[in-house]
Image (cartoon, rainbow, N blue to C red):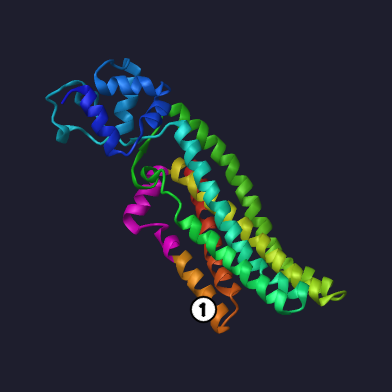
């Protein structure tokens, strides 16, 4: 195979478009197209980047008779642009999950506002339906950046150093968000009790608002922290994932929680909010563990 054939085959094997490869190499799409058609050849520094992106050696790219089975695994190359895109993708997902869960929790406000009349019941179920729909919609979003969560990564030294410095600062912000959520969760009943002295409906409404706020803080901080640790502590993350399947339980816990919420709504066997509270207590423990592990690795 010639270089142009190998480049095209590698790009398709990794499900990249020419635009995505061009973005990572900081060249135009037309340049990548010319390389693949044999009408041009990349410079030496671009060849090195291509070799790290696809985890192949320069010898494999340059020698037509090179055996692909002899090439070592160099890891999956991730540029700063890809890191930013991955984190943006994860943050948007966290926001959608937060919105869906908040719709479910805050649906209880309508009963307090409209005193459990027919309008309240309609709005209650509409809010529940919207929340569940948002969660389902998030689950059906295109799965992007799969390689970051499944492969050993490699970076430019300057890129990963700068990112880890930013991640350390962000971890402190996430810790503040989690602490604020815990404070609201613990002191919330005291606030609502004070308000109930003036109005029961206002006190009940405040309970659901505080709960939604706590859950939002936990989701946004926890998922953002997890995403950044996947990059900053990739070697540790992959080792634990390979050994224990770390964090895979989240993908099982979310649908189980949704089912438990639906059962609670339909059968009235338990409060629909209880499964959500239980899940986020577990998430809180996992996030605290992540914070400690990140701190230990940085030291």
Q: Position of residue 37 (x, y in %)?
A: 25, 21
Q: Is residue 254 above or below residue 164?
A: below
Q: For residue 197, which quarter of the picture? A: bottom right
Q: Nearer the viewer, residue 143 or 187?
A: 143
Residue at the extreme right = 198
Q: Estimate the x, y position of residue 181 in percent, counting from the top left.
A: 66, 59
Q: Secondary structure at mark 1?
A: helix
Residue 24 vs residue 113, the one in the foreground: 113
As drawn, is 35 to the left or to the right of 22?
left
Q: Is residue 2 visible?
A: yes
Tell me the residue that label 1 is attached to: 263
Q: Quadrant of the N terminus?
A: top left
Residue 36 position by quadrant: top left
Residue 102 position by quadrant: bottom right
Q: Is residue 93 magenta?
A: no
Q: Is residue 69 left or right of residue 82?
A: left
Image point 26% across, 16% down: which residue?
39
**Part of the protein shown in magenta:** 234-252
Q: How many neighbours does mark 1 have within 10 angstroms: few (below 14), some (14-19), or many (20 or more)? A: some
In x, y percent, where is residue 291?
54, 51
Task: Name the magenta segment's main secondary structure.
Answer: helix
- Taking the spot 36% from the left edge, 29% from the top edge, the residue there is 18
Q: Is residue 251 magenta?
A: yes
Q: Tell me: residue 128, above or below residue 266.
A: above
Residue, x 60% and y 69% (percent of image)?
A: 128
Please provide percent x and percent y for residue 14: 30, 38
């Amino acid at each position: 195979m010639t270089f142009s054939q190998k480049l095209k085959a590698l790009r398709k094997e990794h499900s990249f478009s020419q635009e995505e490869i061009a973005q990572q190499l900081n060249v135009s799409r037309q340049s990548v197209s010319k390389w693949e058609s044999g009408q041009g050849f990349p410079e030496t520094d671009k060849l090195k980047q291509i070799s790290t992106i696809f985890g192949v050696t320069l010898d494999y790219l340059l020698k037509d008779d090179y055996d692909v089975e002899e090439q070592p695994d160099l890891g999956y190359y991730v540029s700063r642009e890809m890191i930013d895109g991955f984190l943006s993708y994860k943050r948007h997902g966290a926001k959608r999950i937060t919105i869906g869960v908040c719709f479910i929790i805050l649906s209880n406000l309508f009963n307090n506002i409209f005193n459990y009349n027919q309008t309240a019941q309609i709005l209650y179920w509409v809010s529940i339906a919207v929340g569940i729909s948002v969660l389902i919609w998030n689950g059906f979003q295109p799965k992007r950046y799969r390689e970051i969560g499944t492969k050993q990564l490699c970076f430019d030294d300057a890129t990963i150093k700068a990112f880890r410095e930013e991640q350390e600062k962000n971890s402190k912000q996430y810790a503040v968000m989690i602490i604020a959520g815990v404070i609201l969760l613990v002191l919330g009943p005291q606030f609502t009790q004070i308000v109930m002295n003036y109005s029961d409906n206002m006190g009940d409404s405040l309970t659901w608002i505080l709960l939604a706020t706590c859950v939002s803080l936990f989701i946004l901080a926890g998922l953002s922290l997890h995403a950044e640790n996947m990059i900053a502590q990739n070697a540790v993350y992959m080792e634990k994932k390979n050994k224990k399947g770390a964090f895979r339980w989240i993908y099982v816990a979310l649908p189980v929680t949704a089912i438990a919420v639906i059962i609670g709504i339909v059968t009235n066997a338990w409060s629909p909010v209880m499964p959500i509270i239980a899940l986020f207590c577990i998430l809180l423990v996992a996030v605290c563990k992540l914070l400690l592990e990140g701190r230990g690795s940085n030291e």
